[in-house]
Image (tube, rainbow, N blue to C red):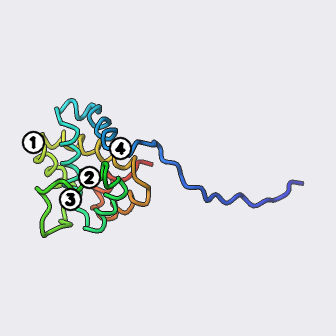
Amino acid sequence: MAEYTEPPINNATPVKERDEPQDLQGFLDELGNSREFQVNGVDARKGAEAVFCTLARRLSDGEDLKLLWSLGKGGIGTLLGTCNIHRGPSHAKRMGRAEFITDVADHLRIPVDQALRVLTVVFTAIRDRIPDDEVAAVASQLPADLADLWRRPV
């Protein structure tokens, strides 16, 4: 007769799908080497800044600081605080997916459908570098249709 045993409790932290470098140059190289950036002639730094700028405008002051610290204050996180175009007294502006993508397109002067592709590349590169709890925290401040783009695929 088989003996019953309790299944082991797994308290292990899930491993990220990829372990990407936190340094700014590695991040920019990943973006610059993507097909979406190359096809649209988008400079890696400018593309990242456009997405970060719009994202920073959408997040609360506390959450954008948490994201900055997760990305490294002296590394990738520096891109989050450099934009002055969208920042202003009305921080944490409510905007849906369409307005978010349009803002990125306007910032980069590219068509909206191409901005969606650039945005997706940047979101993926960011998500791969931050903890899952920070991914969830940012997603909680985005509208559902935009949060789906942000979340790590399952």
Rendering coords of residue 151 (x, y %): 37, 53
Q: Amino acid at mark 2?
A: Thr
Q: Position of residue 128 (x, y in %)?
A: 40, 46
Q: Kindly identify the residue that appears in the image at 59 percent across and 55 percent down.
A: 12
Which tag, 1 or 4, sits closer to the chain's start? Answer: 4
First reached walking from the N terminus: tag 2 or tag 1: 2
The three-letter code of the residue at mark 4 reads: Asp
Counting residues from the start of the chain, the first of labels 3 and 2 encountered is: 2
Q: Position of residue 100 (x, y in %)?
A: 19, 54
Q: Nearer the viewer, mark 4 or mark 3?
A: 4
Q: First in sequence, mark 4 or 3: give its number.
A: 4
Checking the image for residue 4, the label placed there is none
- Residue at (23, 52) in percent of width and height: 52
Q: Residues within 10 Å of mark 4 (few under 14, many from 20)?
A: some
| SS type, badge 1 | loop
Mark pair 4, 2: CA separation: 11 Å
- Which label sits in the foreground, 3 or 2? 2
Q: Which residue is mark 2?
A: 78
**Residue underneath mark 1:** 109
Image position of 38 with respect to 73: above or below: above
